[in-house]
Amino acid sequence: MDAVRVALLREVLAGTEWLGATRRFAGVLRGSVVAHGGGLLLVGTPEYEPWHLAAHLVDEAAWSGTPELAPTLVRQHPRPGDPAHLAVGPGRIAAARRGETLLVVAPGEPAPLLERVHDARRAGVTVLALGADGGELAAMAHDALAVPAGAELDLDTVQHLVSAAAGENAGVPARGRHGFRDRVSRLLEVLTAPPPASW
């Protein structure tokens, strides 16, 4: 990301409530997985798989000393030759039970996904939603962070902010790391870096 775009994004963040909103949502996410200790499932749609968020949450889990933040990425159509961490299919959502948390990252609401989320909630799973404004998914979720069309930030950028905030350990930087605002500033510098090799 060039310096001009970083500066513009900093200006956008300073003029909105995105830092507070993403920090609040990440606190709910962190609180849910730490309190229940049952695991975090992360799912998107067939057209939008949040693999980048999964990779960042794995990093944040290690950095913050909160292993519960490392998600299981649930993919809509895994292939037989995929590595184990990319081979978990929708059946994992059907098997989810009370104590687990399902984070749905979806710019839209395909009917099969809504049915799976509804069934998971009925089974006692904590459902969190990140994506489209309003709609059935937000109504089903225990908590949601909407990224409306035309918002100052897009869904990908908001995911970066959520993952950075989720790694905070009760507001105390882990292992000498800087605070959230410093980390977001650093994050803005590398936002368009290539994805991690393992994902």
Image (cartoon, rainbow, N blue to C red):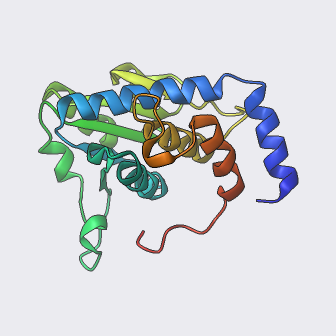
In the rendered image, residue 2, in percent from the top left (x then y), is placed at 82, 59
Q: In which quarter of the image is the C terminus?
A: bottom left
Q: Which residue is drawn at 24% across and 58% down?
A: 89
Position of residue 165 relative to residue 41, above or below, is above
Q: Which of 197 and 147 is in front in this view?
A: 197
Q: Which residue lies furthest to the right in this view?
A: 4
Estimate the x, y position of residue 65 in percent, counting from the top left: 33, 46
For this view, does 191 lie left or right of residue 163?
A: right
Q: Quadrant of the N terminus?
A: bottom right
Q: Residue farthest to the bottom?
A: 81
Q: In this view, does 79 lie to the left or right of 38?
A: right
- Identify which residue, 161 or 113, lies in the foreground: 161
Q: Which of 49 and 61 is in front in this view?
A: 61
In the rendered structure, the answer to whether residue 17 lies left or right of residue 113 reads right
Position of residue 148 measured from the top left corner of the image (x, y, whole percent)? 62, 30
Q: In which quarter of the image is residue 19?
A: top right
The x and y percentages for residue 100 are 19, 36
Q: In this view, does 97 lie above or below 15?
A: below
